[in-house]
Amino acid sequence: MAAETFLFTSESVNEGHPIMFGYATDETPELMPLTHMLATKLGARLTEVRKNGTCAWLRPDGKTQVTIEYLNEGGAMVPVRVHTVLISTQHDETVTNDEIAADLKEHVIKPVIPGKYLDENTIFHLNPSGRFVIGGPHGDAGLTGRKIIIDTYGGWGAHGGGAFSGKDPTKVDRSGAYIARQAAKSIIASGLARRCIVQISYAIGVPEPLSVFVDSYGTGKIPDREILKLVKENFDFRPGMISINLDLKKGGNRFIKTAAYGHFGRDDADFTWEVVKPLKFDKASA
């Protein structure tokens, strides 16, 4: 097969000339990485059982992490089993370490992680550092305040370095990442590939992106250059049009919701960038 050329942008300083990425994978119904979805859902479950009194000893500070063993199936990621579950959570002074571990397994892990992924070899690190009574800014100085990997794909795909929080939708750090996610998700949902990443780069004062790049990791049903052509035909990557097409300037508390549990993979009408845009292609020739 003949070699193909493509546009890909790199930068030395990410200040005003941003690069954004969108990622999607068919390993979950949300078209998100399973590691990230499980870690996020564990965090949400910690909040739920703290607030409803199921685990009244819980306090707000905490961290979750999930390690999964995958099968690389021609570029597509197929989850095989959960290798390790890590939960470190703040607690009151009355609860013992054994009670913490038992409650976390019963009330947090079991309702979130499907049993088919857990086996006798799964490792559980539950408050492995011991007592965690003092938390938040009181216990840990130097917090970044911008968890850009948690906000996106949990380390999968790529990240241009720009945070989302505190930025209005005219900033492409935010809106560009949203449209890139919609494009990537639409590629997977339309059956064009099983896994893909979309990169967009911009320059200040130039409305059209400098480059748009698509990589299907070898899982594409058609060549990546044809997927890219479909993406360019169906998505307007100009910042002003992104805000209009995704209705990003609508009022309400939509962006408050993004402050916790990530910006992607959410089943919420306010997350307009999660709406799939069908991309039609000739399946007979694929």
Image (cartoon, rainbow, N blue to C red):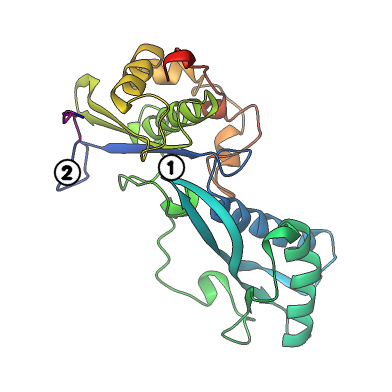
Residue 217 included in the magenta stretch of the image: no
Amino acid at dot 1: Gly
Label 2 sits on residue:
11
From the viewer's perspective, is the residue at label 1 or at label 2 nearer? 2
- Three-letter residue code for mark 2: Glu
Q: Work out whether 241 lies above or below 163.
A: above
| Residue 217, horizontal then vertical, whole percent | 36, 40
| Span shown in magenta | 2-8
Residue 85, quarter of the rendered image: bottom right
**Residue at 62% from the left image edge and 81% from the top image edge:** 132
Which residue is more in the foreground, 80 or 50? 80
Identify the residue shown where x is 72% and y is 86%: 97
Position of residue 226 in the picture relative to residue 60 (left or right): left
Q: Toward the viewer: 10 or 95?
A: 10
Q: In the structure shown, which secondary structural element does the residue marked by tag 2 occupy?
A: loop
In the drawing, does residue 18 fall left or right of residue 60? left
Q: Earlier in the sequence, mark 1 or mark 2?
A: 2
Question: At x 66% / y 34%, what residue is drawn?
Answer: 267
Give whichever of 43, 15 is nearer the camera: 43
Observer-nearest of 234 and 134: 234
Magenta span main SS: loop
Label drawn at residue 166: 1
Whether 114 is drawn above or below 203: the answer is below
Q: Which x, y percent locates residue 31?
A: 56, 38
Cβ atoms at labels 1 and 2 below 8 Å apart: no
